[in-house]
């Protein structure tokens, strides 16, 4: 479900990057428009190797994904129809030059959800997002003590039913965290999430990563809680609970009274997956399971649709430069 990091490194920045990557992984598992959490694991690599600040701007990796959620009932005071969802995603991550004790990275992403609805389900045909992110990771060993680090992310994006770039579709998402690697096996972080769109504007964040046994890792937090097992150098297995969705501006009304407003879309997923690395550059991720629930909330119109459970599957390819 998450991205695999570069080989283990003993540098303080490398350790900090691994911690935040574990606490805030996959790009596909997001709650709000603009949260592309895989940006946090963009792979800066400079003359000193992974974990060191790069000397120049460079393309780090590209990822392409397709996911499908099967047909499931949609209810509002009883069943009103069904919906199935196809999800497409592409992301390019970049490393940026940074001063000593810092690590900078960025990413450019595109996402599209297509809805196939039956009955009287008031949903648009598609939702689309174009996003950009900037991430700064700072080693605080000198300022506070060994193992401490902080991270900030700012992500502007345009999210709508038409893929348009406008003031109405503009969204800004931000994250700030501080954490500590207590030992190579245990780390934690706390922080805050803020966004300009959506029914919830500010959320607290807490994450824990624990390597409780050889080859085993447990990550507890938002937007994903799960366990992973490194079967071999090439193959990793995982299982967990995750969230996906966003807040989108609707320029065209899917039903009377639902034009020029915003739609909060969310899926909560429980699944298992595997990541196989063919070589140091190319990897494939496959996962699937159940969507425990779906929610479509026109919060400005006081209209909420409840989607029932359905199955899902996802395939991703990543190429690292």
Image (spheres, rainbow, N blue to C red):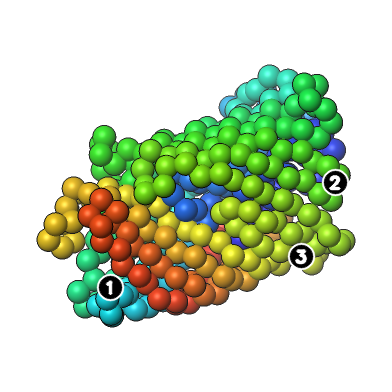
Disc ID at residue 229: 3
Q: Nearer the viewer, residue 174 or 289?
A: 174
Report the Cα–Cα distance between label 1 and label 3.
Answer: 40 Å
- Can residue 267 be seen here? The reply is yes
Q: Nearer the viewer, mark 2 or mark 3?
A: 2
Give the image quarter of residue 127. Answer: bottom left
- Can residue 285 be seen here? The reply is no
**Residue 165: image x %, image y %?**
28, 38
Residue drawn at the location 61% of the way across and 39% of the way down = 191
Q: Badge 1 is on which residue?
A: 76
SS at badge 3: strand
SS at badge 2: loop
Asked if 294 appears above or below 257 in the picture, the reply is below
Disc ID at residue 184: 2
Asked if 127 appears above or below 109 in the picture, the reply is below
Contact flag, marks 2 and 1 (Cβ < 8 Å): no
Q: In the rendered structure, which disc, 2 or 1, sits on the residue that comes first in sequence?
A: 1
SS at badge 1: loop
Contact flag, marks 1 and 3 (Cβ < 8 Å): no
Specify the quadrant that holds the C terminus: top right
């Amino acid at each position: 479900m998450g991205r695999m990091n570069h080989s283990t490194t003993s540098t303080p920045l490398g350790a900090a990057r691994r911690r935040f990557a574990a606490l805030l992984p996959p790009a596909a598992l997001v709650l709000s428009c603009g949260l592309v959490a895989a940006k946090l694991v963009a792979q800066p690599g400079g003359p000193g190797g992974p974990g060191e600040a790069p000397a120049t701007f460079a393309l780090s990796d590209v990822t392409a994904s397709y996911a499908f959620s099967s047909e499931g009932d949609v209810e509002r005071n009883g069943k009103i129809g069904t919906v199935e969802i196809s999800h497409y995603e592409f992301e390019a991550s970049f490393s940026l030059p940074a001063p000593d004790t810092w690590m900078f990275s960025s990413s450019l992403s595109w996402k599209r959800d297509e809805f196939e609805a039956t009955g009287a389900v008031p949903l648009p045909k598609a939702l689309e997002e174009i996003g950009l992110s900037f991430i700064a990771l700072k080693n605080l060993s000198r300022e506070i003590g060994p193992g401490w680090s902080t991270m900030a992310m700012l992500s502007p994006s345009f999210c709508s039913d038409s893929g348009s770039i406008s003031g109405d579709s503009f969204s800004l998402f931000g994250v700030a965290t501080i954490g500590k690697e207590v030992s190579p096996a245990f780390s934690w972080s706390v922080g805050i999430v803020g966004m300009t769109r959506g029914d919830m504007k500010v959320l607290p964040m807490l994450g824990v990563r624990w390597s409780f046994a050889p080859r085993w890792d447990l990550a507890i937090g938002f937007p994903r809680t799960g366990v992973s097992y490194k079967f071999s150098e090439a193959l990793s297995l995982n299982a967990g609970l995750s969230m996906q969705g966003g807040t989108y501006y609707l320029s065209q009304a899917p039903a009377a009274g639902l034009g020029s407003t915003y739609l909060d879309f969310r899926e909560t997923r429980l699944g298992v997956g595997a990541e196989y690395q063919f070589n140091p550059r190319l990897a494939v991720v496959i996962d699937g399971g159940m969507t425990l629930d779906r929610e479509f909330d026109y919060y400005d119109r006081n209209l909420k649709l409840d989607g029932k459970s359905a199955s899902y599957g996802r395939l991703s390819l990543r190429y690292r430069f």
